[in-house]
Image: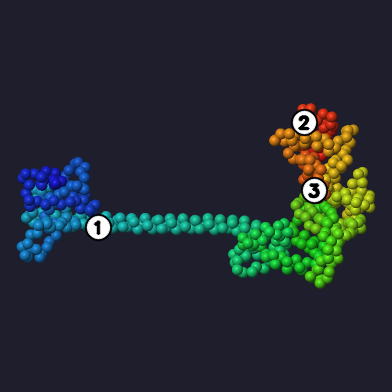
Amino acid sequence: MRCAIFGCNSDNESKNFQGDIKFHTFPRKADIVTAWKIACRRKDNFNIKNAYICNKHFSENDYVRNLKHELLGYKPKNWRGLKEDAIPTLNLPGRVENPDNNNDRKQREELRIKRKNQLELIAHILTENDEQNRTNTEHDDRDNIIKAQQEKIAQLERERKAIEGIFTTAQLKKIIHPDVRPRWTIEDVSKAIILHSAGPRAYRLLLKKNLPFPAVSTLRKWLSKIKIVPGILSSIFDIIKRKEMNVRDKICILSFDEMKLRKEYTFDKADDEILSAFSYAQVVMLRGLHSKWKQPIFFGYDCKLTKSILFEIIEYVQRSGFDVVGVVSDLGGGNRSLHNELEVNENKTWFINPSNKEKIFVFADVPHLIKLIRNNFVDHGFIFNGKQIGKKIVERLTDETNKSDVSITYKISKEDLNCKDARRQKVKLATKLFSHTISCALTRCGMNGKMDGTNWQECADFFKQVND
């Protein structure tokens, strides 16, 4: 190894190397390293990791003293270590240093003290800067935290408003305190009853998922308080009135139909009595014309809906703040008798409202009409545009189109066309027959000559007219 100071000939690989020369590695402190590099007086950028400075350039005061060794006159094999702040000051390029010169020693000591003071001053300044930066950083962090908290509060407020639009106060309390039994309101129970009636299994699933709804037993207790007897359901109107509606929402239509019942005796626990066996129930439904809502308001066992009963229902509905503008029913025998009482026919499709003397229009139930048209088409056929049309045309169509794997009359089959008993009550089968698809299929097959000998054109026009 060779001494890193410029002009120094100390080299342990040289022939003239003296064995009492020792080499020291560069220290770790950055400020001391800088002083060592300055002392080397070199212009090249040498690597201090493998550079060394010999002992010729250090004074006696730069070494750590061992008084025990000095008293015993012992010189260990390993050279003494340098002090942490030792800096090479002897035999530097361009200078001749005499270690015995007290003035030089004093100057070096003053220089060391001055350097130490400078280092302390620099450290103090850096410490103050660090503290100032830390203070500024703390202020910035505090401002950022406050801003983040404010944004979080605003977000929570928006979420609260959104949740309040979905859940009621009792439901929110149930969510926050799941172990506390909430005090359900009429609004909560009425909504829950509607939801339960739409699907009991789905309602139980919602309860299982811990959604805030009243238990099924709670709904039963509330429903047991409502006295349901045949006739006008006045208690139901109390529930409807609680719903917020404008004048337009209260414009409504009455729809009524017969509901088949299993004819058997039943026991009423509430009144402790046995109810007679009935064949059917007449049910009247009130439903909105411009808004989606409906509610049964009347029922009776084995009774036909007469003019007097209908007028009584209409007057009660009008007194409750609703406006009846129409009635809808199927064309069963009992309803045709009611139409005769009201003097309603194909030329006069309305009767006078007994409350406000306005017209109430009468409509036939469209699903029932479509089923009647299908039944008549299948059983007897029609005369349309002067020509006979019936199910044989459709049977011919299915025979022609079912010869391949891909059929353009996939919507219908002969079984659907000749359905019997309960299957005739399915509206879906009737609408599939009188569809645009079947009309186009008839036209296509007729144009290709596959329906010759049939009135396919009139049948296709009839199906299109019914569909449109």
The mark found on residue 445 in the picture is 2
The residue pinned by badge 3 equals: 423
The residue pinned by badge 1 equals: 120
Residue 197 visible in the shown view = yes
Q: Which residue is nearer to you in this view: 13 or 68?
A: 13
Picture coordinates of residue 116, whole percent (x, y): 21, 57
The image quarter containing residue 239 is bottom right
Q: Which of marks 1 and 2 precedes in the sequence?
A: 1
Picture coordinates of residue 55, whole percent (x, y): 11, 52
Q: Residue at x 90, y 51 (%)?
A: 333
Q: Which of marks 3 and 2 precedes in the sequence?
A: 3
Amino acid found under the numbered disc labelled 3: Arg
Q: Residues within 10 Å of mark 1 (few under 14, many from 20)?
A: few
| Label 1 element class | helix
**Mark 3–mark 1 distance (CA, rounded to whole Å):** 103 Å
| Picture layout, residue 427 above or below residue 400 | below
Amino acid found under the numbered disc labelled 2: Cys
**C-beta proximity under 8 Å, tags 2 and 1:** no
The image quarter containing residue 187 is bottom right
| Label 3 element class | helix
Amino acid found under the numbered disc labelled 1: Glu
Q: Residues within 10 Å of mark 3 (few under 14, many from 20)?
A: few
**Mark 2–mark 3 distance (CA, rounded to whole Å):** 28 Å
Q: Residue at x 72, y 36 (%)?
A: 407
